[in-house]
Amino acid sequence: MDKTVNQKAWFLVLPVFAIVAFSAILPLMTVVNYSVQDTFGNNQFFWNGVGWFKELLDPSSDLGGRFFASLARNLAFSAVILVIEVPLGIVVALAMPRRGWSVALCLVIMALPLLIPWNVVGTIWQIFGRPDIGLLGYTLNGLGIDYNYVSNAFDAWATVVVMDVWHWTSLVALLCYAGLKSIPDAYYQAAQIDGASRWAVFTAIQLPKMHRVLLIAVLLRFMDSFMIYTEPFVVTGGGPGNSTTFVSIELVKIALGQFDLGKAAALSIVYNLIIIIVCWVFYTVMTHAGSDRDITPEAA
């Protein structure tokens, strides 16, 4: 019996597509329009072509130098975050209980940092790290460690990194925990019968089963860390100097501080393309790695 195909259901989805397209395409068209023009105020625009893009991609120019410097900081920050948070999230997920009343308690505790707004997180760590009244800053200085995130670039970086790890490691841990919970008990029973070690169970059973959720965790954490703005802006304001001025903060400085709409639009387009390309590379590499691992010797 042939199944009847009815495409009328698409009419129920079209309004949503129209709203999303309207709210996404029009701002994008506005940004593209600004990126190829220049203005001297009074709503008067002059054609500039790809001039802003050339200046942006030229490291010898002021705009290009600022962009590449902030991009290097962004990439370094995202790399440090991924190196710390992904392994730490896996360890935390492995340590969480699988059964009993403590499961709900652990899930609630792990979810608490994710419920705090970004600006509140920045304010908490701004006060927490102050050397005069903050518990962290006062304690470190009391131990003889000269800590001041306002005047020392390394201290500012360490504060922003630790703040992000505190805020978002729970997300990685919860995703990994969901992957661990989906593993049937038969896998562990078979490993116990074979006398597999704890490391063998992790590498042969748990890690492959967490591959998909790890892919999601890496993509989410890269995008969030690469687009970070509120937390470092509240804590350090991009300083000391420009040591924690990431691309997002540089973009706001150009758009709102200098009111150079053309330069800011060109920067935002390149910024968006970098995020899309790097996420696509992450997804492609991790997906291919997972598919190669799924090939059994018999299939090979």
Image: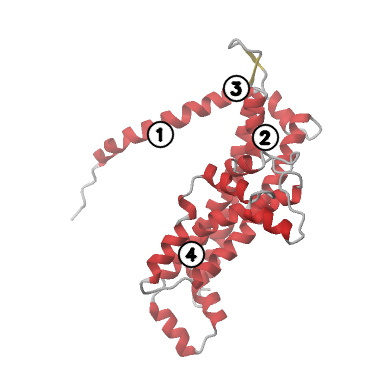
Q: Residues within 10 Å of mark 4 (few under 14, many from 20)?
A: many
Q: Earlier in the sequence, mark 4 or mark 1?
A: 1
Q: Amino acid at mark 1?
A: Val
Label 2's element? Answer: helix
Q: Nearer the viewer, mark 3 or mark 4?
A: 4
Q: What residue is shown with label 4?
A: 176
Where is residue 272 drawn, in percent x and y?
Answer: 59, 38
Render colour scheme: secondary structure
Q: Earlier in the sequence, mark 3 or mark 1?
A: 1
Q: Are marks 1 and 2 in contact (CB under 8 Å)?
A: no
Label 1 and label 2: CA atoms lie apart by: 28 Å
Q: What residue is shown with label 1?
A: 20
Question: For residue 144, what is the image quadrant?
Answer: bottom right
Q: Amino acid at mark 3?
A: Tyr
Label 2 and label 3: CA atoms lie apart by: 17 Å
Label 1's element? Answer: helix
Specify the label residue 34 is tagged with: 3
Where is residue 38 drawn, in percent x and y?
Answer: 65, 17
